Amino acid sequence: MKKPNRKLCPAAAGSTYTDKVIQHFQTPHNYGKMENPDGIGKVGNIICGDVMWLYIKVGKNSSKKEIVSDIKFETFGCVAAIATSSAITDMAKGKTLEAAQKIDKAGLVKELGGLPPIKLHCSVLAADALAEAIYDYYQKQKRAIPKELETKHIRISAEKKIIEEKYKDWVDIEEKIQSKRAG
Ligand code: FES
């Protein structure tokens, strides 16, 4: 019998996870806390309240352009959130900051060969967390923030406020667990 190459998504009857999603979920790349990151992106998902931390180190390439030289993530999100986070770390590593901040939800979903429609909102976490980590880096460096990044930051901050009110108890628990984790 022919082996199916797609897995059923338990949260979305009739929809599926691609093999690539399952691989990233089962063996996530660049998972964990980073010591002394240059930028941190912490975001929440307005649909489900799940939270993600994404850390970057910034270096320079041979053309002296700033690049994402290292990247790690932690999340309390679901299968799709873990897979998209793992994938975005692969996509962003080595890219210039300008190129990395352009990675969006659509590109991420394409990279994974698709997501069940009900799980598309999970991919926003990873894309937003990366944008926020780059924003945090520019801010710490007291540098001008690119317009597109500033616009994203305003939207993400507004959503963060709603999430903190709507899911207060859950967000507090996640914060406590995350802060106890070793780097
Ligand atoms: S259900 Fe919350 S991130 Fe997927």
Image (cartoon, rainbow, N blue to C red):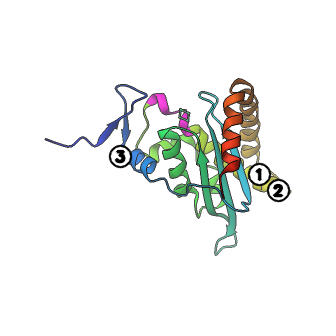
In the rendered image, the quadrant that contains the C terminus is bottom right
Ligand 1 shown in quarter: top right
Segment tinted magenta in the rendering: 117-123
In the image, what residue occupies the spot 58% across and 57% down? 92
Q: Secondary structure at mark 2?
A: helix
Q: Which residue is mark 1?
A: 136
In the image, what residue occupies the spot 47% across and 40% down? 79
Q: Which residue is mark 3?
A: 19
Answer yes or no: do the residues labelled 2 and 1 have beta carbons within 8 Å?
A: yes
Q: Which mark is residue 183?
A: none
Type of amino acid at the residue the image marks with label 1: Asp
Sequence-wise, the earlier of marks 3 and 2 is 3
Q: Which of the 4 quarters of the picture holds residue 36? A: bottom right
- The majority secondary structure of the magenta stretch comes to helix
Type of amino acid at the residue the image marks with label 3: Asp
Q: Which residue is mark 2?
A: 140
Q: Residue furthest right?
A: 142
Q: Secondary structure at mark 3?
A: helix
Distance of mark 3 from mark 2, alpha carbons?
A: 39 Å
